[in-house]
Amino acid sequence: MTPLDDVGRPGSRSASADSPTGPWTRPLFARFRAHTPMRPLFRCRACGARWPCQPARLALLLIYRGDRQGLRLHLAGKLLNALADQPRTDAVTLAVRFLGWLPGSPGAGADATGRQPPRSAG
């Protein structure tokens, strides 16, 4: 067990049943940083990668796990914002970046140029 594992656990040095928050001193995901887009470049605020970065994709899939159409609409809105903010960027490249990673998308697995990776023979 690392020192961070027992922070906020009942019986640990930092936990107190009398504290205003009860025996838990930290929220479960206190160290999680939201991976949100930073406009106008649409880079991730947390990690600096092109948004949606891998942690943002995972979070979006979890948030919209029962509503794939809602996720597509949310990402389409972000795509429209990106197109307005970056008029010189190729629209297809942005569309693949924002929507091509979704499960069941025609471009799922495509790289930034929209090309599918070569399939291995076997």
Image (spheres, rainbow, N blue to C red):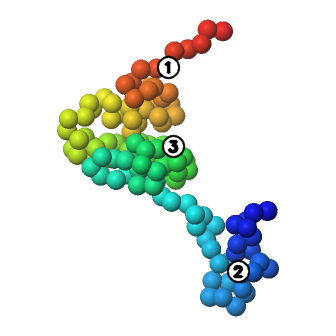
Identify the residue at image location x=62%, y=88%. Answer: 20
Mark 2 or 1, nearer chain start: 2
Q: Whole-Å distance between the Cαs marked 2 and 3?
A: 33 Å
Q: Position of residue 45 (x, y in %)?
A: 41, 55
- Depth-wise, is mark 2 or mark 3 nearer the camera? 2
User: In the picture, residue 119 is in which quadrant?
Assistant: top right
Q: Residues within 10 Å of mark 3 (few under 14, many from 20)?
A: few
Residue 66 appearing in the image: no
Q: Disc 3 marks which residue?
A: 54
Q: Amino acid at mark 2?
A: Ser
Identify the residue at image location x=52%, y=34%. Answer: 103
Residue 40 appearing in the image: yes
Can you tell which mark lies on residue 14? 2
Q: Position of residue 73 (x, y in %)?
A: 37, 45
Q: Whole-Å distance between the Cαs marked 2 and 1?
A: 50 Å
Q: Whole-Å distance between the Cαs marked 3 and 1?
A: 18 Å
Q: Amino acid at mark 1?
A: Pro
Q: Disc 1 marks which residue?
A: 117
Q: Residues within 10 Å of mark 2 (few under 14, many from 20)?
A: some
